[in-house]
Amino acid sequence: MALTGKAWKYGDDVDTDVIIPARYLNTSDPAELARHCMEDIDAAFASKVGKGDFIVAGKNFGCGSSREHAPIAIKASGASAVIARSFARIFYRNAFNMGLPIFEAPDAVDEIEAGDRLSVDMERGSLRNETKGKEYRFTPIPPFMRELVAAGGLLSYIAKRKKKGA
Amino acid sequence: MGMTLTEKILAGHAGRDAVAPGELILAKVDLALGNDVTSPIAIQAFRSLGATAVFDRERIALVPDHFAPNKDIKSAEQVKMMREFAKEFGIANYFEVGRMGIEHVLLPDQGLVIPGDLVIGADSHTCTYGALCAFSTGVGSTDLAAAMFSGEVWLKVPETLRIVLSGRPAKWVEGKDVILHIIGGIGVDGALYKAMEYAGDGIAHLPMAWRFTMSNMAIEAGAKNGIFPFDAATKAYSDGRAKRKYEVVTADPDARYADEISVDMSALEPVVAFPHLPENARPLSTVGNVPIDQVVVGSCTNGRIEDLRSAAAVIRGRKVHDGVRMLIFPATQEIYLQAMREGLMEAFVTAGAAFSTPTCGPCLGGHMGILAKGERAISTTNRNFVGRMGHPESEVYLSNPAVAAASAVLGRIGGPDELP
């Protein structure tokens, strides 16, 4: 599957409180959460993000709380994926469970600037910066996570397994 | 090959003789928990499976603590969804307001989490129970839904970072200072994907309350869990409290550790973490003049009776500074009652502090103590991210309860030794 869009660039340690501030956690409605996505780090993001755009960030993206509202808000905002140097572990888990693709691509992250046009080929594991004319490889998704994605997420995976009496 | 504490507990719950870092395992869950922020999403996911029963109604805990007592209509609807789900599926451990507390203090105090357990919770501070020599880690709502359904969780076996503690902490230095010092050294992703395992003869100087604080903040170093070995203090805490028979797990002498760091606790002074990351830890003596508007004592990190005693010992007979609001949050109803019996509540209220019913409230900028633009708080909570306690242009400094109380009197960040 190929994803194409523009880069929204942020720094290291982007935490779940700036991805979706706790004052909005009294709902789990994706559309409402999307309206406040990235609000405390970039008030313009929610209104200006284009369909298919990418969030590009440094190390430890999604650190902090376990709120699944964070990947839900990003997905509902229209962004297609997050590309970072590294991810905090609960966010990593939640993103896969929610069906939000995320990639660790340190070299690409260093050279991407805000507004660059990117395209990502998830199967080939490649990222092309169209603006700069450069191509990168990213760490492939572990086989188990691919299994989860193929099953349609964690819940359908568990349900199928239970049905088989495993 | 020998196993670390974390590897041993994971192997035992996966029905395996041994596991090694990097392996993916399917493990049995002793307890799965959620709160009023994370449970609604889990409940919707659980219902979407069309399940007619949970895996074990005794092994699920639902605690409305974040926006409870309900702060607004939407929060009330979320808690109502939890309450109705708990009733419909016969969840034994649903804790209503008036009988509840902050989940990570309440559940071990009630003996629902015990040594040797494997616990997952839809809350990042679920790692708190490592203090009991249990494996516990935070997950998302979908993972909670899956565990409520199947009683199992997929986990990657983490590498272990060994932290060797020595020395006796000086007066006014508490568990909070030790963990802030460690995070300051390794950074907010210094233990990313890893288990933190404490060792060394310094552990004997750490009361259980301090160990809970230290395990609680493992997530602030990116860790999967933060675990202490079982000793006399763990036994004294668990005996007479544990609702199930517990199992004592020990690390093998030839266990393999990815890395090791040492901390001489006797060399530490109180530590303050500056905005906007817990890794911005500085010794109290280097803080300088930082005036404050608000002081918060409480949370899953420092809302235990020992924490309230520490703050009360500093504030007793003194007054909260004119320009400061001081807010005290006992973590559970039992702690609230104990604080009342010991005269701690009176010490706080007489000093001019507000004493609240248990809630996570201000820690995450939920309610009961939100900061305005440009305001500054010192807090015994766990995170000082941008906007964590209110306006994105407010600031949070993290400290232990004694330093927080001294700062309330001084009107600026300072320690108990600076008080007249």
Image (cartoon, helix red, strand yellow):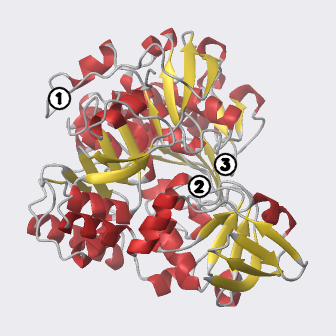
Q: Quadrant of the C terminus of chain B?
A: top right
Q: What residue would you read off at disc 2?
A: A63
Kind of residue sitting beneath label 2? Cys
The residue depicted at 28 percent of the width and 75 percent of the height is B44
Residue situated in front as seen by the camera: A153 or B363: A153
Q: Secondary structure at mark 3?
A: loop
> Can you tell which of label 2 and label 1 is closer to the viewer?
2
Do the residues marked 3 and 2 share a common chain? no
- The residue tagged 1 is B241
For the image shown, how many numbered marks are present on the structure? 3
Q: Secondary structure under badge 1?
A: loop
Q: Specify whether B88 is left or right of B208.
A: left
The chain letter for the residue carrying disc 2 is: A
User: Which one is nearer the viewer's eye here, B278 or A31?
Assistant: A31
**Circles 3 and 1 in contact, beta carbons < 8 Å:** no
| Residue at the image position 69 percent from the left and 29 percent from the top | B284
Query: Which mark identifies residue B277?
Result: 3
| Left or right for B50, reference A31 | left
In three-dimensional space, the C-alpha distance between marks 3 and 2, rounded to whole angstroms, equals 10 Å
Residue B187 image point, x, y percent: 68, 40
Q: Residues within 10 Å of mark 2 (few under 14, many from 20)?
A: many
Q: Residue at x 68, y 35 (%)?
A: B186
Q: Quote the CA–CA distance across marks 3 and 1.
A: 36 Å
Of residue A64 and residue B169, the one placed in the foreground of this image is: A64
